[in-house]
Image (cartoon, grey):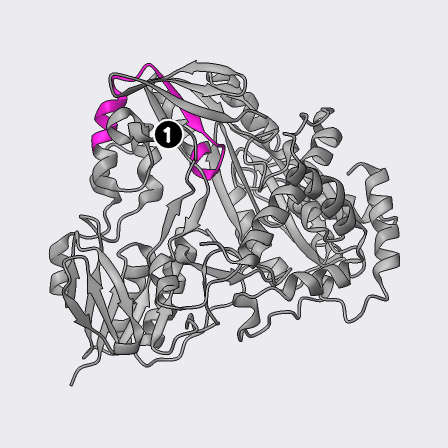
Amino acid sequence: VSSPSQWLRRNSERFLLEAAQADMARRYLGQMPEPPEGGIVPAFWRRIFVPVYRRIPWAIRRRLILAMPGSHRRPWRGLGTFGSVAPPSSEWTAPLQATEGRHEQGGS
Amino acid sequence: MARRIVVVGGGAAGIGAAGAAKAADPTASIQVFTEFEDVGYSPCGIPYVHGKEIPSFDSLLLQGKEYYAKAGFDIHYQTAVDKIDPGNKRIVLDDGEKVPYDRLVLATGFTYADPDVPGLELGSKGGLYFVKNIRRAMEWDKYLDTVKQAVVQEASPLGLEMTTALPHRGIETHLVDPHPWALAEVADPDIMQPVQDSWEEAGVKMHFNTKVEAYLGENGKVRAVKTSEGEIPAQLVVICTHKRPNAQLAQEAGIAIGSTGGIVVDERMATSTEGVWAAGDCVELPHGVSSVPIQGLSGSHAYAQGKVAGTNAAGGRRRYQPVFVPWGMVAGKWMIGGVSFGETLATALGIPFVVGVATGISRARYYPEMKQVRVKLLADPRTLRLIGAQMVGGEGIKERADFLGMAVRKGITLEDLATMENVYSPPIGALNEPIAIAAQNGLAELGRT
């Protein structure tokens, strides 16, 4: 039996990966993504969840992710101290987004 | 009275736990329960026996049953555990026998995600193969001699290994995967392209963006796989769906389960229930960069976690750590590997990153059997700390993945890597290390040369 957190993770992971794979396919393979399967529920995740998730600043997004129950909520030495993705505040999200844009233009 | 430690599961985590518990407390009574006929073998080696790279399944077994008996382990083979009862500190076997314990280690491993398509009832007798048990693999290996066409369902790590192995047996191999490229949940398309090219050379038929819709049978045997792109004739389907944590016993006993479906543990591999530890594919662990819990790691992770769980269950003090997941494997004619994130996963999660890419060489350019090595580094754009890497090449991928795994863990930056020293010796190393060139290119991308 899936808990609400398992249900949320399974679906968010699926549709965020699907969107990221479509981005990668366009960038590296020159392919348009396959037309996704229809339905109201997938449409919600694709048209509402994914765009909203992508607009939330990383610092807030990360706090939401880490609010989920799991092993990361129990004692682990050194966890959460990785500087690059454990920002002390959301102040640096704007410069980050600017840099992301530069990366995308570079086409890696 | 000797401490009674019960281990449920005889894979890498279970045997690691049993051995470490015995080492930490030689007076302890160690009982291991496994539903299978063997313990402590390498299931990861099964595709290589099928592919004839390894001549025999015997070499996959670490030790014989006598070894474990002599070492003082009381191993109960082919004995399924029906229930765990932490309140009364006992487990219940499927025949109803109750076995008491003082400390319990759960190493119950994984199950394959249910493909959830019609025809699954054909089962293993009908040609549907879930690679796991070495005894069944021995039987399947004989069956492979009769197979002309096979479908590998899903380009997971096991799917890649089987897609590489089956053509070695002269089997017409079809890879069917719902994603746009192979291993698309882990690896990036530019990393996988050479692999896919080499499969094509080997005659593999790839069907991406394609879903399996049914297994079609005749006289109890699979005859074809119905996909979203049409039917593929096959006498064998190797089902390589996701590995899910086998945490049902823990869940039924009220032990906390996380968002991955894995057992929640802390750095001592202790579960939410006192006196119960867990390790291996049945647990979830926090990722060192993102802190997000993940599951389904390698056998080396499972074994190391088992040692931590076993030591602590026996009264010792040992810690595990958040994981950065260096990985690597052979796929087609290539080696692929990486650490933490590739672009696909980082994009999905929404982690900011910059990329540095380079294609270098593994030996001096004039030395025989020199191979190309493509390295892609991902770094935090603010601090330039490495957060991930992906690679494809002819050799030296595993060593680079191990090194980069430690580099991510220790907070090494693109600037550090751009100026790293490297071994230069024509047979084993080129003048310029591809990792360093990739880092230099990443800095150039940012205008920081």
Residue range (magenta): B139-159
Q: Is residue B433 visible?
A: no
Residue type at mark 1? Answer: Val
Q: Is residue B245 magenta?
A: no
> Viewer-proximal residue, B278 or B61?
B278
Give how far across and how far down residue B166 sits, in percent. Answer: 37, 24
Q: Residue at point 31% right, 30% down?
A: B121
The image quarter containing residue B414 is bottom right
Query: Is the residue B207 above or below the residue B134 in the image?
Result: above
Q: How many marks?
A: 1
Is residue B373 positioned above or below B253 on the image?
A: above
Is residue B422 left or right of B102 when viewed as pictured?
Answer: right
Front in this rendered view, residue B295 or B54: B295
Quarter containing the N terminus of chain B: bottom left
Residue under label 1 = B238
Q: Tag 1's secondary structure? A: strand
x 46%, y 35%: residue: B330
Where residue B336 sits, quadrant-wise, is top right
Q: Can see residue B417?
A: yes
